Image (spheres, coloured by chain):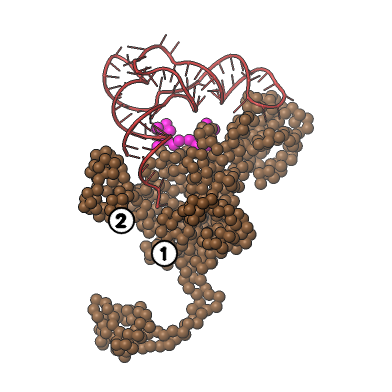
Amino acid sequence: MNHDKMSNISAKRGFLWPSFEIYSGVSGFTDYGPLGASLKNNIMQKWRKQYVSGEGFYEIEGPTVMPKEVLKASGHVDNFTDPMCKCEECGEVFRADHIIEEVIGEDVESLENEELDQIVIDNNITCPECGGKLSNIWNYNLMFKTEIGAKGDKVGYMRPETAQGIFILFKRLERFFRGKLPFGAVQLGKAYRNEISPRQGVIRLREFTQAEAEIFLNPKDKTHPKFSQIEDVVLRLNSQEVQEKNLEPLEITAREALDKGIVANEMLIYQLYLARKFLTEIGIPEDVLRFRQHLAGEMAHYALDCWDVEVLTDKYGWVEIIGIADRGDYDLTSHSKYSNDELNVFMEYDEPKKVQKTVVKPNLSKFGPIFKGDSPKVKQAIEDADVEEIKAAIEKDGKYVVELDKTYEITEDLLLFEDVEEEITGEKVVPHVIEPSFGIDRITYSVLLHSFTETEEKDYFKFDKSVAPVQLGIFPLVNKEGPREIAQDLTEQLRMAGFTVEYDATGTIGKRYARADEIGIPLAITVDFDTLEDNQVTVRDRDTEEQERIAIPELPDYLEKYYK
RNA sequence: GCAGUUGUGGUAUAGUCUGGUUAUUACUUGGGCCUUCCAAGCCUACAACCCGGGUUCGAAUCCCGGCAACUGCACCA
């Protein structure tokens, strides 16, 4: 692990470059060079393979610009902001709520800025640094704001996460999956957050790539059909208790974690397992990974349970690269409320339930003459009220009182009670959502960092062959007629077969091997003068440097098998 | 956002304090020679003073502003 050396080579060889460099750059943005983009794409392809074909989810793609309404409902417009204030003497900028809470010792999170300003005045709160006068409080919203349309009266934001794009498609998705829980949709794409001062390179970007899955499931059934297959897998868990008591991380099986209630449910544990499987398969070793449970105060208020996957780095310490949360029904309920659409699933019972109950009906022939024009709303009030309550009131006082803008007294003779048997075939259920959310840029960084290998002879990216940006180096041993033509033909042929190939004929063979190793090409193929005789080439392994002679006609199969 | 430090070819650097010739050196890269398996050697070429303004006869060098990187503080739903 060597961030500095790795970054240097990564910039030199075309993985990560600072954005807008010729105009001095802007912090919080990064460019992926040719090899970086290829690496990132390979990682995303591998992700799709695991979650789309592997888990049976489907990928959707929504807009990155969203109208205000969506983000109002999700809470981002109101809660994705920080109240800030500035000292007019020393110029220091503070979180206004933090300063105030410190002085008055009360939670002020729900208050408006004007109220906060008043508290500052009333309590004579000054700059904690120099005691100077504080400015009025303003909101800093971390979303990029824009306008939709020519009139400019429709406010839009760049999406701060890809998840909302899936939630707002819920009705369509529910139809698509024919109403059967659980089902899952994924989205990969850019998200935007106007960070106040991003500093840690690709770790905190203002524009970044997320890969998120939203798994909708029955709140009463959070099991996973494949749980029994993974129940003996050992997970390293930094639970709330471990963190609070400063203990060693737990090393326990999935089954134990479930039985002891450390992770909330099977689906969540299964997602932890899947996340780790993904990371190890793209070349991040298990011993630099851990699962950390969010502390009670750290968790979003709606989350039922939340675990981060963290990776160890030499420069930034433990860094969150994946968040896996049980968000309950928060998102669907909230969008349902704001959009007035029903976002739920009708769950049919195995057998219809028969329910005996008493219903109350207003006797309308008497209602009309008595209540006249108010009759419809009194009727509605009766229908909305609890039958037992009405019954009890009439037994006790001989009348039931409806309080609307006026008071209405309803005596027994105005009502008809009826015993009925109802058949209920099922119920509407708002699904819960389990969300694994991957930070692709941070994961790409982790792959770079942990693939980077220093040995006595060479420093190189030891990429897993499944994500290596270049798969093959093809070299004529010497740049002479004969081997050169064969090597060029072979390059063409293997490119046609779908491999990414670098052809290189310059300098000495050693230099070309070194250059290929540095960018992590797993296999190099060398054509020499013997090839002219026996039609065989040398295949050299990046890590062992061992060589093998393979006949050219067998090469496509050999490589197909190797990269499978 | 605040403070400090820094900014010279692709990379790493000399020169800046004390303003003055064609901006130093090494590696890398392109072309050529040589070369039958791990960065060898020879020839040759390309290539830089972060951006803008000021002071001055003259600025990589001094001053101001901006941008970026690093460190500390603050921030990270």
Mark 1–mark 2 contact, CB under 8 Å? no
Residue A377 image point, x, y percent: 29, 78
Picture quadrant of residue A370? bottom left
Q: Which chain is brown?
A: A
Disc 2 residue type? Glu
Residue A377 inside the magenta-drawn segment? no
Q: Relative to residue A20, is residue B29 drawn left or right?
A: right
Report the residue that reaches farthest toward the bottom.
A413
Residue A394 image point, x, y percent: 32, 87
Q: Which segment did they paint magenta? A: A12-26
Chain on which label 2 sits: A
Q: Is residue A179 something one can see in this rendering?
A: no
The local crowd at label 1, few if under 14, some if 14 to 19, many if 20 or more residues have their Cα within 10 Å, is many
Residue A256 image point, x, y percent: 58, 60
Report the residue that reaches farthest toward the right.
A534
- The residue identified by callout 2 is A106
The local crowd at label 2, few if under 14, some if 14 to 19, many if 20 or more residues have their Cα within 10 Å, is few
Which color is chain B depicted in? red
- The residue identified by callout 1 is A333
